[in-house]
Image: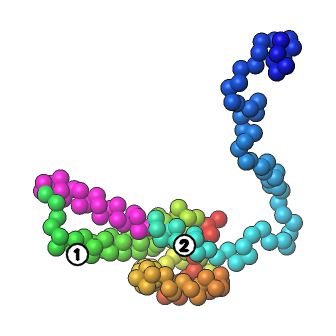
């Protein structure tokens, strides 16, 4: 019998595995969730309920991806019908078509549902004006234009919002409504 083998069994095979397979994985136990209702008068999160810039960025990226995918589907359908790819001069028209699709995808969904596809994915909704009415088409178009100007300026108008979480973005100021967390 060797010094390293157990006294009452076959010698242990060295497989390189530890007895606990997750022993080397740096997990810490999570604290238990407190699902009890908070006492009255105590805030449960962001007091303002305003959406954060990362949430807005997620919503904007999802809306842009939706518009781009719709345009790509149209370009693929045109390729399938005509059997040729668009010429380089046609890319300008594709960009204009992307803006067109973006406008209608944003404005229609804001007017009908109070949120775009991206806002729904990010859990955001346009704040009610207090009278229970939805955005008008003009307010929704101004919100789209404010977002477009912010994107064209590479996000520079968001510097004012980044310093003060309660400050409205350009799209908020133009539409007269802010984005809040849904729910």
As drawn, 72 above or below 145: above
Residue shown at 67% from the left, 74% from the top: 49
Confirm whether the magenta stretch covers residue 78. Answer: yes
Residue shown at 52% from the left, 71% from the top: 57
- Our reading of the magenta stretch's main secondary structure is helix
Query: How busy is the neighbourhood of tag 2: few (under 14 within 10 Å), some, or many (20 plus)?
Result: some
Helix, strand or loop for disc 1: helix
As drawn, 161 above or below 114: below
Give the magenta-colored segment's residue range.
63-83
Quarter holding residue 47 = bottom right
As drawn, 21 above or below 56: above
Residue 80: x and y in percent read 18, 53
Left or right, 167 with respect to 27, comes to left
Describe the colour scheme in one phrase: rainbow
Helix, strand or loop for disc 2: helix
The label on residue 92 is: 1
Residue 106: x and y in percent read 41, 72
Q: Is residue 47 shown to the viewer in this render? A: yes
Residue shown at 87% from the left, 14% from the top: 7
In front of the other: 92 or 22:
22
């Amino acid at each position: 019998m060797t010094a390293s083998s157990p006294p009452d069994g076959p010698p242990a095979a060295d497989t390189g595995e530890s007895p606990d397979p997750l022993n080397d994985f740096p997990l810490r136990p999570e604290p238990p969730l407190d699902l009890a209702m908070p006492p009255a008068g105590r805030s449960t999160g962001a007091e303002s309920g305003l959406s954060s810039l990362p949430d807005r960025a997620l919503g904007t990226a999802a809306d842009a991806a939706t518009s781009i995918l719709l345009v790509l589907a149209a370009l693929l359908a045109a390729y399938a019908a005509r059997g040729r790819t668009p010429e380089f001069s046609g890319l300008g028209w594709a960009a204009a078509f992307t803006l067109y699709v973006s406008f209608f995808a944003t404005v229609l969904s804001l007017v009908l549902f109070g949120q775009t596809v991206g806002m729904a994915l990010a859990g955001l909704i346009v704040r009610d004006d207090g009278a229970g009415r939805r955005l008008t088409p003009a307010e929704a178009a101004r919100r789209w234009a404010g977002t477009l100007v912010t994107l064209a300026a590479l996000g520079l108008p968001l510097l004012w919002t980044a310093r003060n979480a309660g400050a409205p973005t350009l799209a908020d100021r133009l539409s007269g409504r802010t984005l809040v967390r849904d729910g």
